């Protein structure tokens, strides 16, 4: 299956910093493109951890997802791999220079996207 990065309009503005441009031009489209895989991965992660997500209220669901992003380094590294693996060589070079900040942004955006899509985890 061939995936193409979606074009997200209106995110890139004049005078934005390189990191913000990278986030909006590269990271966000990849996260959007990988949405279905991210949801499938989280569902599998919940099953492996024997978390019965269906019985939890929405607030607890969001809290549980947040805890994975805060405490589970293996989980976070797999999420990062899903995204970083789609970088071009030039994008990867920029990533290497700014990896800590870009990793933080990737995880933050992905967490928010999953929280906003909590209904898809049923």
Image (cartoon, rainbow, N blue to C red):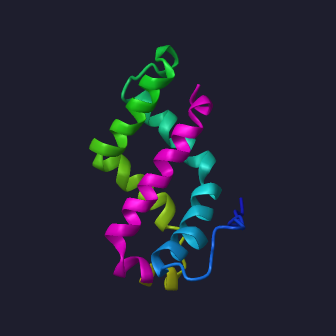
Q: Residue at x 38, y 23 (%)?
A: 50
Q: Residue at x 64, y 68 (%)?
A: 11
Q: Based on the displayed image, in which of its 4 quarters is residue 104 positioned?
A: bottom left
Residue 102 is left or right of residue 121, and the answer is: left
Q: Residue at x 62, y 32 (%)?
A: 120
Q: Which residues are magenta?
A: 94-122
Q: Is residue 114 above or below residue 34?
A: above
The one of 54 and 10 positioned closer to us in this rendering:
10
**Residue 52 visible in the picture:** yes
| Residue 16 position within the rendered picture, expressed as x and y whole percent measured from the top left | 53, 78
Query: In the rendered view of the protein, which quadrant contains the N terminus?
Result: bottom right
Q: Is residue 121 on the magenta stretch?
A: yes
Q: Is residue 82 above or below residue 73?
A: below
Principal SS element in the magenta part?
A: helix
Q: Is residue 25 above or below residue 52?
A: below
The one of 59 and 6 positioned closer to us in this rendering:
59
Q: Residue at x 42, y 23 (%)?
A: 60
The one of 4 and 58 positioned closer to us in this rendering:
58
Q: Is residue 79 on the magenta stretch?
A: no
| Residue 6 position within the rendered picture, expressed as x and y whole percent measured from the top left | 71, 64
Q: Based on the displayed image, in which of its 4 quarters is residue 71 positioned?
A: top left
């Amino acid at each position: 299956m061939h995936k193409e990065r979606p074009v997200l309009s209106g995110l890139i503005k004049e005078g934005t910093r390189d990191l913000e441009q990278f986030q909006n031009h590269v990271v966000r489209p990849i996260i959007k493109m990988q949405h279905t895989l991210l949801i499938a991965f989280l569902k599998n992660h919940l099953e492996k951890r024997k978390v019965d997500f269906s019985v939890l209220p929405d607030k607890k669901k969001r809290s549980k997802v947040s805890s994975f992003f805060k405490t589970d380094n293996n989980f976070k590294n797999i999420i990062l791999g899903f995204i970083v693996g789609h970088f071009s060589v030039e994008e990867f070079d920029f990533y290497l220079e700014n990896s800590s900040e870009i990793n933080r942004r990737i995880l933050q955006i992905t967490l928010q996207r999953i929280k906003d899509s909590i209904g898809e985890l049923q």
